[in-house]
Image (cartoon, rainbow, N blue to C red):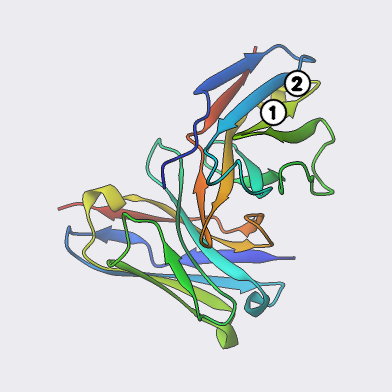
Amino acid sequence: QSALTQPASVSGSPGQSITISCTGTSSDVGSYNLVSWYQQHPGKAPKVMIYEVSKRPSWVSDRFSGSKSGNTASLTISGLQAEDEADYYCCSYVPISTYVFGTGTRVTVL
Amino acid sequence: EMQMVESGGGLVQPGGSLRLSCAASGFSSSLYWMTWVRQAPGKGLEWVANIKQDGSEENYVDSVRGRFTISRDNAKNSVYLQMNSLRAEDTAVYYCARDSGGGNYLPWGQGTLVTVSS
């Protein structure tokens, strides 16, 4: 049950695109299309942005997209906006019936 | 509107116990796995435990197994976390969330703070 590995911080200028990686193992990220991504602003509860690797809730901007290759999942934010500045966490299914979060990434809009 | 409201947090001495409650509204929690997630001050999210719709299966992160017990009362649309033998490292905001499928946690509660200190 080791945490998934994410970069501690990623930054970009308004309008740019950034990508956050989430590296697991062949036992979790690599074996199941059950990776989700959460955005958390300071003092607030997390909010789901992507689930099942690439599915986006209807209320989430299409600037957010998810993908996966091998043991690494990725969250891409395009057209970066000031409101995107937050912490982001990935989460993966781990058999049997448990989950693990990533270490978290602080996104800064320059 | 779907909502989760946690309660029961507070200050407790090491070795003590606390029971957290989470009341769901706007949906029937009996249809979903329910989950507890915690976040230590200034740290990341940690998945803690989950429970199946009918309460027949419970799962825990290694660090709390044997000390914490998750349960639910579908008649009250509620889920609980009994925490025993508390340690300083259990200090965190505890969130409950509905698993809408495959780790799609929605909604989340506002969280309840548990502080373990003498």
Residue A50, given in percent of the width and then of the height, sits at 72, 43
The amino acid type of the residue labelled 1 equals Asp
Q: Which disc is residue A80 wearing?
A: 2
User: Which sits in the foreground, B57 or B39?
Assistant: B57
Q: Is residue B94 left or right of residue A29?
A: left
**Looking at the image, residue B109 lies above or below residue B39:** below
Question: How far, Cα to Cα, is label 1 from label 2?
Answer: 7 Å
Tell me, yes or no, whether dots 1 and 2 are on the same chain.
yes
Q: Could you tell whether B20 is left or right of B97 in the image?
A: left
Residue A45 seen: no
Q: Is residue B13 left or right of A11 when viewed as pictured? A: left
- Which residue is outermost to the bottom? B75
Q: Residue B108 lies in what quarter of the image?
A: bottom right
Tell me the residue at 52%/23% (across/down).
A7
Compared with residue B101, is residue A73 higher up or lower down, i.e. above or below? above
Answer yes or no: do the residues labelled 1 and 2 have beta carbons within 8 Å? yes
Vertical order, B74 against A19 (above or below): below
Tag of residue A84: 1
Relative depth, front residue between A42 and B72: B72
Quarter of the view holding residue A108? top right
Q: Position of residue A60 (x, y in %)?
A: 79, 42
Query: Toward which corner of the image does residue B101 lie, by quadrant?
Result: bottom right
Q: Position of residue A4 (x, y in %)?
A: 50, 37
Q: Callout 1: residue from which chain?
A: A
Secondary structure under tag 2 reads: loop
Q: Element at badge 1?
A: helix
